[in-house]
Amino acid sequence: MDRFLSDQMVLPGPITLADLPPRDTVRWVSRRKAAVVAAVQAGVISLPDACARYALSVEEFLSWQRTVERHGVPGLRITHAQDYRQPGRER
């Protein structure tokens, strides 16, 4: 599977654990989300391991995956997505 360099560029070759964002990632830009999706799809990391590593819910990961499938990496450009999913949380 290709490695994402930016929202619209990919590097050929298999994705590796070294291509993944750091465990303490807080700012989820589209290329980081895409790298995690690509790694799970390629079998580099399992879905449960990715969710544990990045404190993601399965639903959040699956939403990233659906977005990549439907709209490509640029579709992942959503700011404050968690703010919109948590009732009662103010921005």
Image: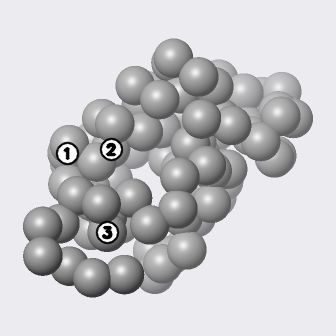
What residue would you read off at disc 1?
Answer: 58
Mark 3 or 1, closer to the camera: 3
What residue would you read off at disc 2?
Answer: 61
Find residue 82 and name its label. Answer: none
Placement of 57 over or under 26, stated as above or below = above
* Mark 3 and mark 1: Cα distance apart in space: 17 Å
Which three-letter amino acid code belongs to the residue tagged 2? Phe
Q: Secondary structure at mark 2?
A: helix
- Residue depicted at x 31% and y 69%: 83
Give residue 91's quadrant in the image.
bottom left
Placement of 3 over or under 27, stated as above or below = above
User: Whole-percent x and y of residue 73?
Assistant: 65, 35
90 left or right of 86 in image = right
- Residue depicted at x 28% and y 48%: 60
Number of numbered callouts drawn: 3
74 left or right of 5 in image = left
- Residue depicted at x 67% and y 50%: 31
Q: Residues within 10 Å of mark 1 (few under 14, many from 20)?
A: some
Is residue 6 visible in the rendered image? The answer is yes
Which three-letter amino acid code belongs to the residue tagged 1? Val
* Name of the residue lying farthest toward the left: 87
What residue would you read off at disc 3?
Answer: 83
The answer to whether mark 3 and mark 2 are in CB contact below 8 A is: no
Give residue 53's quadrant in the image.
bottom left
* Mark 3 and mark 2: Cα distance apart in space: 16 Å
Name which of mark 3 and mark 1 comes first in the sequence: 1
Which three-letter amino acid code belongs to the residue tagged 3? Asp
- Residue depicted at x 68% and y 37%: 74
90 left or right of 71 in image = left
The answer to whether mark 1 and mark 2 are in CB contact below 8 A is: yes
